[in-house]
Amino acid sequence: MANQFYAEWYFYAKSDFDQVLDMMKKANPHYHIGIYHLHQSVEKLLKLLIMIHARQEEPPRTHDLLKLSIKAAESFSEIVSYQDSLIDLHEYLPRLRYPTGDRITHDDLEICFAKVEPVLKALCQKIDELMEML
C-alpha cells in the first residue's frame, strides 16, 4: 500500500515539473505559475524522500525548502550541496502567493529552472533508488 501512496506523490511531483516545461515553451504572461510549479515539484520530492526514509505516509507540514532539505539530508546527504539553489527558489514563494507589483518574466523562469534542474534530477535519482528497494 505504501508503494502506491509514494508512487502517487511521485506522479504529482513529476506533473508539476511537466507544467514547468510547458510554461517554458510558450510566450505567456503567467511565468509566476511556472516557478510556483517548480517549487511544488521540489517540495513534493523532498517530502516524498523524507516519507520514504521514515516509512511513513504523513508529509512534513511546511513549504520551507531549506527546512525540508535539512530533514531530507538524513537519507540523502548530497542534498546539502544544493541548498543555495533551494534558497533561491524558496525566495520566490512570497512573490508567487501575494502580488508585489513586479512581474516574473520568462528569463526569471529560465534562470530559476537552470538552478533547480540539477536538484530535481538528483532527487528523482535518489527516489528511484529508494522506490526499487521497497
Image (cartoon, rainbow, N blue to C red):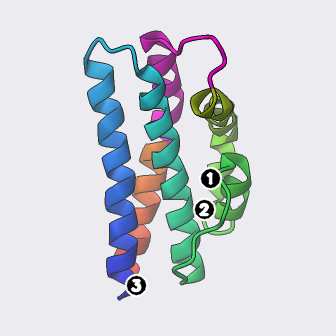
The answer to whether marks 2 and 3 mark residues whose Cβ atoms lie closer than 8 Å is no
Q: Residue 89 location in percent, x, y?
A: 61, 33
- Specify whether 67 is left or right of 25: right
Q: Residues within 10 Å of mark 2 (few under 14, many from 20)?
A: some
Q: Is disc 1 surrounded by few (<14), some (14 to 19) or many (20+) residues within 10 Å?
A: some
Residue at 68% from the left image edge and 57% from the top image edge: 62
Q: Earlier in the sequence, mark 2 or mark 3?
A: 3
Residue 18 sits above or below residue 58 on the image: above
- CA–CA distance in space, label 1 to label 2: 5 Å
Dominant secondary structure (helix, strand or loop) of the stretch shown in magenta = helix
Q: State the SS at label 1.
A: helix
Q: Nearer the viewer, residue 100 or 86?
A: 100
Q: In whole angstroms, how far apart are the C-alphas of marks 2 and 3?
A: 20 Å
Q: Circle 3 sits on which residue?
A: 2
Q: Which quadrant is home to the C terminus?
A: bottom left
Q: Quadrant of the N terminus?
A: bottom left
Residue at 52% over, 15% down = 104
Q: CA distance from mark 3 to mark 1?
A: 25 Å
Q: Position of residue 26 (x, y in %)?
A: 26, 16
Which circle, 3 or 1, is nearer the viewer? 3
Disc on the earlier residue, 3 or 1? 3
> Is the residue under label 2 in contact with that under label 1 (CB below 8 Å)?
yes
24 relative to 52 in the view: left or right: left
Highlighted magenta segment, given as a residue range? 99-119
**Amino acid type for the residue under numbered disc 2:** Phe
Residue occupied by mark 2: 76
- Give the residue type that dot 3 points to: Ala
Tell me the amino acid under the disc marked 1.
Answer: Glu
User: In the picture provided, is 125 more to the left or to the right than 48?
Assistant: left
Rendered location of residue 36, percent (x, y): 49, 36
Disc number at residue 78?
A: 1
**5 versus 120 height, above or below:** below
